[in-house]
Amino acid sequence: MITIPYLTALTTYFSYVLLFVFGQLRDFSSNLIDWWKPSNVQVRQGYAPICLGLEDFYIRRIFLRVQDCFQQPISSPPDAWIDVVERVSNDNNKTLKTLGSVPSFIYFGRRTTKVSRCLNLGSYNYLGFAAADEYCTPRVIQSLKKYFAGTCSTRVEGGTTALHSELEEAVANFVGKPAALVTGMGYVTNSAILPVLIGKGGLIVSDSLNHNSIVNGARGSGATIRVFQHNTPSHLEKVLREHIAGGQPRTHKPWKKIIVVVEGIYSMEGEFCKLPEIVSICKKYKAYAYMDEAHSIGAVGKTGRGVCELLGVDTADVDIMMGTFSKSFGSCGGYVAGSKELIQYLKYSCPAHLYATSLSPPAAQQIISSIKVILGEDGSSRGAQKLAQIRENSNYFRSELQKMGFEVLGDNDSPVMSLMVYNVAKLPAFSRECLKRHLAVVTVGFPGTPLLLGRARICISAAHTREDLNIDSLSSIATKHRLFLSSASALRWHNPSPSSAFCWHDLKLLSKSFSLVPTSHVLACSSPSNQQVIGLPRLKINRVRLALKVKLRYKPRDSSCFSFGFLMKTYIL
């Protein structure tokens, strides 16, 4: 459950409403202009528009205005420091061009672009294997010379090499399962395997914050899907008890199969799954436990074996263990591990194994080599040092952020942490300000998160040094954009909660970030001098219901600027 200031929630809703209204006015104006002067776009008569609906509206009128904060290209390995390619736009962010690429200059055989050297706080390079490694890199190069870049075939035809068999054996031993199956993509591992494991007449009980790959896999299975409150075992037990008692819809027959799906570390929260309690409930109600360890395998636990090792759960109690190689192992692909009977069944029926091109041999070698380093089989202690370093870095950086006053999500020892930003106007402002100060961060808003819960997600790596993580500039950025929300930081302000007070600041950020008004109008919006917020209200969100307990007194000197006339005056086509 996340608790946010009520006024922050109110201003966030107001920001989205403002963007929606401006977008609709722009669409109306565009349609009016096109009616008088038809555009040169060819419209196929009799066909419905291929891009239609709120998704298209959201992309055109909201996302494109801040797309410079997303999909930022890099020109270096995703190490502790990366080269971010700078981009410019001459049409209000509708299109972006890299500096130096137009015209394209060739200098010593490569295209030159203007880059900014930034501290990498966004990549999943948890153990630092995504950059050059003294043990992994030579072996990957050797496998490239022997097998080349790809197999050009599926696993059941000509796509299984000795490396694939060795990798599956290594993964099974590493996670503590009898057998494993490797796929070429982590996302597909969930979305393709879940429909094979369960179908019509089955019940999937999924955590409310599970990854989109799990959501799509569950939908594609045809099974009945029920959601329990995030990381709440008591609610999971309630859902299981009710649906086991009621049986299948209409017929009330017993369920053919029940699978409970959770994640080891939730990728947007950085929280560990409450695995011991969930496993106990699954045993009680005879439900299979399916765990996605994409962000936890290799990164947590004494020897990097994931959440089971960290929380003291026997891997035999988790029936299906899934994970990816694109985080801790510096490669790509995914795996599913379980009993020999389960893996053999998947090899006969899983489309990701039967029809998809197999994992690239150099990528497979990278995973094998990194596992050996983690286990110390390379003859060194670098693996143990990396695990200790990422744990130390994560806990240090989280504590520093909390001291600064940020509201930080995530558990200790987790390399993933989220800085809560909430307001849609502050997301692009925070991202752009970080880039100016050579910090590469990932900001996430709707639809990646719920409407009110925009955030900046930080991923820590073992490659970071203590000097890298001493970032005082984050504090100044937060002060500038009023991101401090925790009670500790509130003591540093005369206002009880500077981030929750609208004070025109969010409106100015909204106007500037999304180009709603000219710069002169943005600078002209000054805040009333005697504005007060007395009695900090909070809004509690648990993804199921909203509970409001509010006591608010708000006394601005002049509220005329909120009038419709002000909005029409500042609006530009």
Image: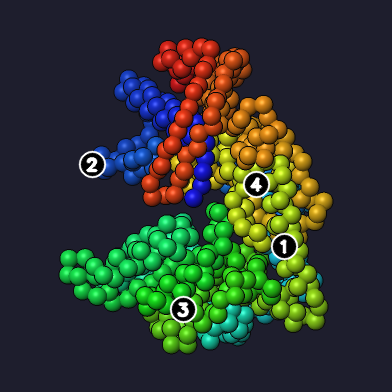
Q: Residue flagged by tag 2: what amino acid is it?
A: Gly
Q: Are discs 1 and 3 less than 8 Å apart at CB?
A: no
Instruction: Work out which quarter of the rendered image holds the C terminus and state it.
Output: top left
Dot 4 or dot 2, earlier in sequence: 2
Dot 3 or dot 2, earlier in sequence: 2
Q: Nearer the viewer, residue 183 or 154?
A: 183
Dot 1 or dot 2, earlier in sequence: 2
Check disc 1 and report the residue beneath it: 390
Q: Residue flagged by tag 1: what amino acid is it?
A: Ile
Disc 4 versus disc 2: nearer the observer: 4
Q: Whole-percent x and y of residue 44? A: 29, 40
Check disc 3 and report the residue beneath it: 319
Check disc 4 and report the residue beneath it: 441
Q: Whole-percent x and y of residue 57? A: 39, 37
* Residue 293 falls in image quadrant: bottom right
What's the CA distance linking mark 1 and mark 4? 18 Å
Q: Residue flagged by tag 3: what amino acid is it?
A: Asp
Q: Are discs 4 and 3 less than 8 Å apart at CB?
A: no
Q: Are discs 1 and 2 less than 8 Å apart at CB?
A: no
Q: Residue flagged by tag 4: what amino acid is it?
A: Val
* Residue 23 falls in image quadrant: top left
What's the CA distance linking mark 4 and mark 3? 36 Å
Helix, strand or loop at disc 4?
loop
Could you tell me which residue is drawn at 56 percent across and 62 percent down?
272
* Residue 410 falls in image quadrant: bottom right
Q: Is residue 490 left or right of residue 47?
A: right
Per the rendering, the mark at residue 46 is 2
Dot 4 or dot 3, earlier in sequence: 3
Disc 3 versus disc 2: nearer the observer: 3
Is 211 located above or below residue 447 in the figure? below
